[in-house]
Each structure stands twice: as structure tokens, then as C-alpha cells.
Amino acid sequence: MEGDPAPVDGSDVDGTTGPGDLASRVVNSAAQDIGGFIRAQREAAQVSLRQLSQLAGVSNPYLSQIERGLRKPSAEVLGQIAKGLRLSAEVLYVRAGILEQRPHSAVRDALLADAVLTERQKQVLLDIYDSFCRENESAPPGQAPDTDPGTAALYETDPDEQEK
């Protein structure tokens, strides 16, 4: 009937769900996933909700809503939370679905875990590393990436040998 309320589960009256409902559930699921991940990281770092809100520069209630999956934070807020947790922002961006997962490597993992580097420095180093990897993948099959004639000349003569 026309006066009947819509079902609580988000389905239409005939039991089907519309595309808007599906999108809403996907967004809610992603928000809960990133919120749960942030909470787990905060607890692992033994940082209180109030401390993290101060470190990240976001309000305590807003951070609580993010952790409970009620709000989906922007990339900027995720970056601030990552800084407060001393995590790579890339980790949170991937978890939130903002960035695609990159292949794991020891170099990448070490860069992301380095607490001395800033987020910007990590990103620049990762971009350089990725460009080298792409260059090596596109090298002709018969030529190893490290046998580039231009760089081979740099190593042909040893300056100490020339002085003798």
C-alpha cells in the first residue's frame, strides 16, 4: 500500500534493493572498515581517543564517529590521523579505498615504516622507486636494466687507478 513505511533493511516494498541502497551500504562498509582500522592502530599505539584527536587536529566527537563507522573521513583528515598515529598516509588511503594497493616489496615497506622521513619525502622516494621498477620492466628482453651503455661508462675507469 501507499501508506506503508519502507522496509527497515533498505529494500524496496517488493524486497529488491536499488542501486542507491547498494552504494550506501558500500560507503557505510568502507567507513566502518577504515574506522575499525584506525581504532586498532590507535589502541596498538596505546594512544587515547582524546590524545589522537589533539595530535591529528580533529575534534574528539568527530574522531569517535569515524572510529565507529558513522563518518567517512576525507583524504585530508586521514592524512592528519596518519600523522598523529605516525603511520604512512598511504596505508590509510588504501584502506579507505582512496588509493589502489601497490605491490609489496621490502623497499616500499621500509620506506613506509621509516619514522624519520616526512610523508612528502616518503612519497617522493616511492615515486622514484616505482619509476625505476617500471623502467626495468620495460627494458628489452636481451638487455639487463643495469647494462645501460650510458651508465656503464661511468664505472669503466677508477679515479684512483688514473692517478697511479
Image: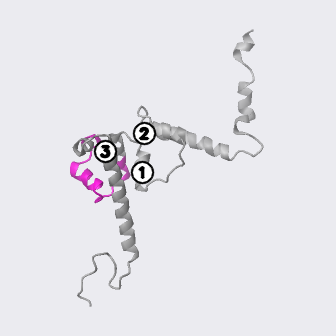
Q: What residue span does the magenta drawing correspond to? A: 54-78
Which mark is first along the chain, 2 or 1?
1
- Residue 9: image tag: none
Residue type, label 2: Glu
Residue type, label 1: Tyr
Tag 3 residue: 42
Residue positioned most to the top: 164
Residue positioned most to the right: 142
The N terminus: image quadrant: bottom left
Secondary structure mainly formed by the magenta segment = helix
Tag 1 residue: 93
From the top left corner, tell me how far across and down residue 31 is, in percent. Answer: 34, 58
Residue positioned most to the bottom: 1
Camera-side mark, 3 or 1: 3
Kindly report the distance in space between the C-alpha atoms of the residues bearing marks 1 and 2: 13 Å
Kindly report the distance in space between the C-alpha atoms of the residues bearing marks 3 and 1: 16 Å
Tag 2 residue: 119
Where 29 sits versus 119, above or below?
Answer: below
The residue at the point 29 percent across, 53 percent down is 67
The C terminus: image quadrant: top right
